Each structure stands twice: as structure tokens, then as C-alpha cells.
Amino acid sequence: MTSNETIKLYEKYVISNYTRLPIVFVRGEGSRLWNAEGRCYLDLFPGWGVDGLGHCHPRVVEAIRAQAGKLLHVANNYYMEPQGELARLIAQRSFGGKSFFCNSGAEANEGALKLARLATPPGKHKFVTFTNSFHGRTLAAISATAQPKYHRGFEPIFPGFSYAPLNDLAAVEKLVDDETCGIMVEPIQGEGGVNIASDDFLRGLRALCDRRGMILIFDEVQTGCGRTGKWFGYQQSGVTPDIMTLAKALGGGVAIGALVAKPEVAAKLVPGTHASTFGGNPLACAAAIATFQAIEEEGLLDHVTQIGEYIQGRLTALRSKFDFIRDVRGKGVMIGMELAHPGAKLVERCLAAGLLINCTHDTVIRMLPAMNITRGEVDEALGILEKGMGEE
């Protein structure tokens, strides 16, 4: 099909709940995508962070092919080897927790909220989350998301959620009462503008939860699975949560989410309390196992740290040339560049020049490049970006 033919199919048959750019991608490899007419694009925001190994990583593709010939799906009232192996890989690289598998970050966060209520005494049901957070699109997840724009049209949202500014421990302490069962926080807010929770703040949340008998939940949907240069974002601060949620890069491009909980907390999720029909299916788990193997065998955690520092250094250097750059921040390959004005036009110019980036929170240019992106690809991308910024 031509691009126009595919777009007409969407116009007739697909609900228009996304603002779509008029591009039809048909093939991807690493940090590059090709459209239906054969034009190549350099992708610094692959799959909104899902394609952490880039597009169609050979190890992930082969794992999917092999698993597809053996077993695609089996009900969760039986055992399956890939699910058990993936849970082991996560536990051994994190805090020894047990995993519940689902299909997305929103589902993982829903499960985390339910488990926090189960794991605390009766009467505790409230949560504290943070301004500019983002936790997903289900009704409970948007209630946890402290951004009014996501609540509009869906009111009344779920009761029991209070919102504090990130990195303001005193504000959190004022919101906590005897009915508060948990705190949910992103180690780095992604959609909210690549805002980093300080180590001291996270340590304060840990101490507060321990003191008040609350569950500390880290939403690591975006920071998990190598994105920050550690296996999981919490490892950057040394603060261990009671529950961690994962998705996006976990499956190397395949839909999968996970709720990971300390064993004593996980024990509260007994049969009948929670489930997911497709969660942890063999195909998704095989892809996730291959993702873990590729990260380790290719030394990508070290590469992420080095290439992330290189990207931030290059962007910081541009501040002397462009006075509308307010800040550059991030960890590993989770990077934000805050502008003094909206960034949508810059994104459009880069797209026209063959570079895919994202603007979030109106003024923050967000980049989540593949963990295996090369320095040459970074230089090519930043050259396009700099040229686009010169037209501001």
C-alpha cells in the first residue's frame, strides 16, 4: 500500500483518538525507520521508549520466531517456562521480588495500587502521588496522574488521591494521614518533563513509609530495564521500593508489563485478587528474556551511561549558542531539553529533516534513544537538531 491508502483505511475504520503524523512506517532496524515510500528516518524516540534496543533487534526477533513455533499462549492456571525464567531474571537484577505479569504500564500500576491496599491494614486506602506525574490511561491510573488535563471529561475521578510537588517532602508529610496506604513516584518523571526525583527526597519517602506503615511504589515504566544506565532507576538512588512497576522497554518491542513486589508484600496477592488473561504469555516473555540477554551480552548498561553523558554534554554546549535553552537534564538515555518557548515547531522541522524526537509538557524536547544507539547516529541526530534550532 501507499501511505495515502493506509491513511484512508484509518480514516474510515480506526477511532481517531490519536493525533497522528501523516507518515506510514513499514520497516525498522536499530535506530532507523523507513516509510512506505522508502524514506529513512533517524529515531531518537523509538516507540515512546518501548523499543529500548531499537527496532527489530535480531536477538528479540529470533526469540519471537522460535517461541511462536512452540507455544503462543497458555492460560495462567498452568505453568510455563518463559514466565518463570523472566521472573527470575528480574528478581536477580533487582531486589529479589516476585513478579506479576500483565500487558502494559497502566495495568502494572493498577495492580500496584490494588496490592498496596491489600498489603496495608483495613481502613488504609489513600495515596499520595506527584504533580506532573503520569501513570497511565485507565481510570485509577489517571486518578493517580496529577495532571488535570488527563482528568477532564472523566470526572469524578477515583477518590483518595492527593498530590504533592516533586522533591517537597514537607508537602508529602502534610498530606499523609492514618488512612494513607501508599506513595507512588516516578524516579524520573517522563511525560511530565524529565524531572528527576532527588536522592534525598526518595530517601525521605522511604523513611516516611517505614514510619507510617505505608507502601512505597516506584513507577519504573519508563526508567526501568536499563534506561538510566542501571537495570532499574531505583538503583541510582539506592532507595528500594516495596513495589516496582515495569513495561515499555521490558519486551524489546512486544507488549508486556510487570508488577514486582517484595516477597512479603507479594504474598498478599492471593488467588482471586488479581489477574490478567494475556499477562506473561510465552511470546512476550521470550521477547523480554532476549532483551535482558542482549543488554548484558552487549554491555549496554555501561554504553547507556557513556552515550547519555555524551548526549547531555553536546546539548549543554548548545546553550552557549541558543539562549532559549533553559535546561538539559536526565540520566542515561532518558534526556530532556527544556526550552523557553513551545517546542512543537522544532519537532516538526526535525521530522521534515528525517529525525524523530518528542516534545512533552509543551516546552521539553524529550529523547529516549535506543540503548544501543551509536555515537555516529547521535552526531547525525544532533546535527539535524542543531540546524532546526537555528531556525527558531
Image: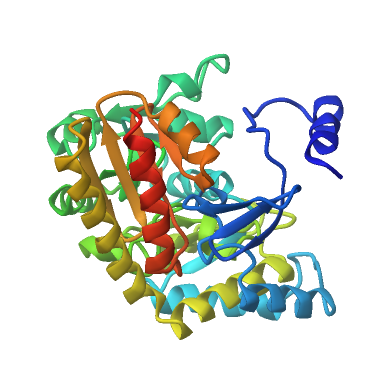
Q: Quadrant where the N terminus lies? A: top right
> Residue at the location (38% across, 29% down)?
343
Applied colour scheme = rainbow
Taking the image as shown, residue 226 lies to the left or right of residue 200, namely: right
Give the residue displayed 65% in from the left and 56% down from the top.
Answer: 255
Q: Position of residue 152 (x, y in %)?
A: 52, 15
Q: Is residue 256 positioned above or below 71 on the image?
A: above
**As drawn, which residue projects farthest toward the bottom?**
297
- Name the residue: 39% across, 56% down: 223
| Image quarter (top left, top right, bottom left or bottom right) of the C terminus | top left
Tell me where residue 239 sits by quadrant: bottom left
Asked if residue 312 lies left or right of residue 99, the reply is: left
Q: Quadrant of residue 282?
A: bottom right
Going by the image, does 246 lie left or right of 335? right
Look at the image and tell me whether residue 219 can be seen: no
Picture coordinates of residue 238, whole percent (x, y): 22, 65
Q: Can residue 345 be seen here?
A: yes
Counting from the top left corner in percent of width and height, residue 88 is at: 52, 79
Image: 344 above or below 48: above
Q: Position of residue 32 (x, y in %)?
A: 57, 59
For the residue pair 331 and 257, the one nearer the viewer reads as 331
Residue for point 21% across, 51% down: 202
